[in-house]
Amino acid sequence: MLTRVGVPVEYEAEPSAPDPEPTSLICFSHLRWNFVFQRPQHLMSRFAREMNVIYWEEPMELAANETAYLQVREAADAANVRIVVPHLPKGMPDDAREATLKRLLDAHLASLRGPLVAWYYTPMMLPFSRHLDADVTVFDAMDELSKFKFAPAKLLDLEQELIDKADVVFTGGSSLFEAKKDRHDNVHCFPSSVDRAHFCKARAHQFDPADQEDLPKPRLGFYGVIDERFDTELLAKAAEMRPDWSFVMVGPVVKISEEDLPRRPNIHYLGGKTYDQLPAYLSGWDVALMPFAMNESTQFISPTKTPEYLAGGKPVVSTPIKDVVRHYGALEGVGIASTADEFVAACDAAMELSRNPESGWLAEADLMLSASSWDTTQARMAGLIADLLGTRTGAMSPALLVAAE
């Protein structure tokens, strides 16, 4: 080679630098990965395409005499997502509990190299993680948790600490954005999006699931968590007014008693289903329902169900949830109703639309949905995080500043 005899060589490019260490994202979530597939799962499964994602769940209890440990597994439905579940002895005092969680967290993250993004869905995980030296801290406020049933007393104080600590705040809807925008100088609204390809399957003929196939038609359905946000009284009245309709309720019952659910021959509770199963259930319905109670817990919600139902080709009837009215209330395919009489009347109108999808209401809905996708939402979030990582990368680290003095 010429370089061996001292002949100068002009390089067109500098020798390549070693590949940088990959970015890791640790997501602290109050929602279990395998509970209901919603905003955290949609976003984290997409972030995992470009970085390592650790999904840190709430602790599970052990017997009082057992030793704390972490259960770690790979998510079966998302590549490169690692689920971490702390297991703690029952009855630990709060200070011992937080110290143990901190020790488990530090041990799990000790081998990480490269930039770290700390992503919070709940401020309740801040006490054992506030010491993390994350390159970017994200607070994704998908719900106003302080308004939920059994909300911890210290949640609001911890939320303010998290907002003060965060580099960027995302909100899951317009109402939440209005509530948070003046509490941080870098707040962005990212309303619920939709995986259109997944729910469009409901527009084609699907074989009815076994627990739905024998239910009489017409069918009016709801899927989601059945909790204090659900208007059980409205459902009971509507079912009583229309005994020939089948009301199909798909989803787990949480924080309310099974005994508090209305029982009628035409109300059918089918339990929780997987995300992959939802289009098959949706396909067999004539109208999709959102019978949310108008109370403190629904003041700031922005239900993912609205675009999912529409993507599945079903007209929607909802109570007047603020973000639903604001973003979808003008669509012909979305009926808004406050009382049982209004709700039933809106369902009658929606069934007529369901029989005539070519009338234009579905094309109108599709036009709106074309601007909303989880891929786009995640890409915009990733861009904001990349800007912050770029700013941090360009700055001199504290260690170097000390060395330079």
Image: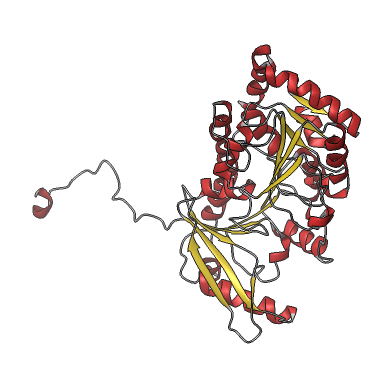
State the residue at coordinates (75%, 28%).
Answer: 328
**On screen, residue 283 above or below 33:** above
Q: Which residue is at the front of the view, 214 or 178?
A: 214
State the residue at coordinates (77%, 59%).
Answer: 159
Of all residues shown, which one is farthest toward the top?
Answer: 359
**Rendered image quadrant of residue 347:** top right
State the residue at coordinates (81%, 65%).
Answer: 152
Residue 129 percent across, percent down from the top left? 64, 68
**On screen, residue 260 above or below 298:** below
Looking at the picture, the colour scheme in use is secondary structure
Asked whether, in this view, residue 180 is left or right of residue 79, the answer is right
Residue 271 shows up from this direction: yes
**Rendered image quadrant of residue 66:** bottom right
Residue 99 percent across, percent down from the top left? 66, 79
Asked whether, in this view, residue 238 is left or right of residue 403, the answer is right
Asked whether, in this view, residue 75 is left or right of residue 297, the answer is left
The image quadrant where one finds the C terminus is bottom right
Residue 403 shows up from this direction: no
Residue 41 percent across, percent down from the top left? 58, 49
- Number of marks in picture: 0
**On screen, residue 31 above or below 364:** below
Q: Which residue is at the front of the view, 178 or 198?
A: 198
**Rendered image quadrant of residue 316:** top right
Of all residues shown, which one is farthest toward the bottom?
Answer: 65
Residue 363 percent across, percent down from the top left? 64, 17
